[in-house]
Each structure stands twice: as C-alpha cells, then as structure tokens.
Amino acid sequence: MHAVRNISFDVRPGETLGVVGESGSGKSVTAAAIIQLIDPPGRITSGEVLLEGEDLARVGDQRMKQVRGDRVGMIFQNPTASLNPVFTVGRQLKESLGRDRDRRDPDAEIERTLTGVGIPDPSRVVKQYPFELSGGMNQRIMIAMALTARPQLLIADEPTTALDTTTQAQILEELVALTSEHDISLILITHDIALVSEYADRILVLYAGEVCEVGPVDKVISQPSHPYTRALLESVPRIDSKSERLEAIPGELPDPSESRAGCPFTARCPDVMDVCHRIDPDPIRIGPGHLAACHLWASEHAGVGNP
C-alpha cells in the first residue's frame, strides 16, 4: 500500500508552506517521512528528502538522532501527549538546549523564548508541570521547545486542532512571526484551508497521497485550478453567504490498498472526463510557481512543460 506517491515540493528559508487536505490525504505521513518517524512496516521506498544537499532519506539512525530537534523540529497535534508529566517545563526546555553548548545563560534564553510565544510569566511557568497548565499554554511550550533548538526546518502537524478559535489565532500568529524572524522554514499541516490562507506564503494541496495543486497563497485561494482545491474552498463556512447548508464533497477518499488507474479524485470530481479514468495527470504549470495536476489544463497549457 502506497500512502503517498510522487510528492515533490520545496520550502525556502523563512517561508511558511501550508499543507492541506482531508484526513487520510497523506499530510502527516509526508511529515513523518521527512524526519524518518514512520512506524514499521512503513518505509520510504524511493525518493529524496534534501536538507541543504544532505539526503535525510538515506542517513542512518544515529545521524537522524542528531538531525531531529537540532536541524529539523516537530510540533505534534497533542501537546499533552508530547510533554513528560513528571518533569517541569523548565527541565524539558533545557533538554532542547542540550546540544548547543555556546549558550552561556540558558535560563535567560528559555525565558525570552517563552515570552516570545505569548507566555506572560515565564519564571513561574518553568517551575510548573504540564498537567498544571491549559492546553493552549502546553502548545505554546511545545512551540518554544522546537524554537529553542533554532532548527532550519520546523514541521507543525495540526498544532492548534484542540484549541479554541481565539487561542488558535494567537498561537499561529506567534509561530509564523517567530519562524520568519529567525529565518526558519515552516511546514504548517492542517485540514483547514481557510486557516492556511491567512498564515501561509504558499499552499500545497494533497489528496489520496498525491499533489493536486501548489502555488502562492493568493493565487490558489483566488484562482483554484484543481476541482479538489475548489471543493475545499467551497466547503468553508462564509459569513456573507445566505445558504442554510454547508457545501460538502460527496463520496470518500479512495482505498489506498486498492490498485487504480487515473486521477484519484475521479469518483468525486464534478468535471470528470474520460481521460481522467485512464491517466493520472502530471502537474501542469498554470503560472509562476503555480501548478495543478488536472487534465482540465492539459490542452490549454500544452507545450508549457511540466516542472
């Protein structure tokens, strides 16, 4: 079973790439593959994961232990499950500073980082345990732990799913601002395309383990070029809409264990054509940095060339 296939993208220093799609689209598996956290029998069968020329898909376990947390950080969905309940927040933050011995005042740096992620009284919080704090505070601590190591790449896998809307917005604003300030590449994974439209520089849309569309956030949101991207946008609630029912995407994701030909979105696509059942389309360049894997664009952009 191929959970993801033919996925290709890049993230620039200081850039936020939003990765969106329904549950089961391959977002978290892609993130886990980058830092080799795929549970057996899962494995990477082909391809490269290049970080400044080093292929992380081919390095051994010892090298990956040095990369994780140091050069590539990860913020998981559930901060309560990721923090150790028997150690104080301060002790766990100091562990994330462990590899960098040039820092002469780790306590001061930890307090600065906690202040940067919106914690008002860091000197008190460092003495507390995770179970004494709210979900929003624990998520801020997780972000602080990831940032204290100053990674080149930070992956945030639905970091605000369990939080209320106000706290969610505050944390995302702080996260995007801090990564941009420190020139850290950020991959923001979510199922909420409306959320990504506010905080990302570019959007990568995944469906059934494949790339549907990728491009600058303003172009993808204003001119969605793949039927799936358009369907995701139409399913977002709008305050200016008079409709009493939310739009929904009919059908379900295809079973990844079953072999298939053609485009994976065929069974749910309102614009399906005969060719869609036979050939899985390659990404086609729609405009500068904007690509869509859809046969609707094949004739219009014939000769432009694929990336």
Image: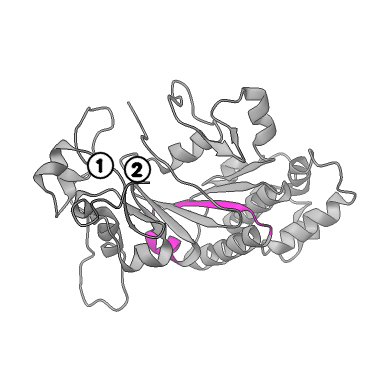
Q: Position of residue 50 (x, y in %)?
A: 55, 37
Which residue is painted at 25% across and 58% down in the image? 231
Q: Reading the chain from its start, which is encountered first: label 1 or label 2?
A: 2
Q: Position of residue 155 (x, y in %)?
A: 55, 47
Residue named by callout 1: 253
Residue 123's disc is none
Q: Locate residue 126 relative to residue 283 in the image: left or right.
A: right
Q: Is residue 90 magenta?
A: no
Which amino acid lies under the numbered mark 1 shown in the image of this protein? Leu
- Pointers 1 and 2 in contact (C-beta within 8 Å): yes
- As drawn, the residue found furthest toward the top would be 41
The picture quadrant where one finds residue 277 is: top left
- State which region is magenta: 182-197
Which amino acid lies under the numbered mark 2 shown in the image of this protein? Ser
Which residue is painted at 45% across and 58% down in the image? 202
- As drawn, the residue found furthest toward the left would be 274
Q: Locate residue 260 relative to residue 126 in the image: left or right.
A: left
Residue named by callout 2: 25
Q: Please tell me whether residue 106 is drawn above or below residue 86 in the rendered image.
A: below
Q: Please tell me whether residue 69 is drawn above or below residue 198 in the rendered image.
A: above
Q: How many marks?
A: 2
Secondary structure of the residue carrying numbered label 1: loop
Q: Position of residue 260 (x, y in %)?
A: 20, 31
Residue at mark 1 to residue at mark 2: CA–CA distance: 8 Å
Q: Please tell me whether residue 157 is drawn above or below residue 262 in the rendered image.
A: below
Q: Residues within 10 Å of mark 1 (few under 14, many from 20)?
A: some
Which residue is painted at 35% across and 43% down in the image? 25
- As drawn, the residue found furthest toward the right would be 104
Q: Is residue 190 magenta?
A: yes
Secondary structure of the residue carrying numbered label 2: loop
Which residue is painted at 62% across and 61% down in the image? 180
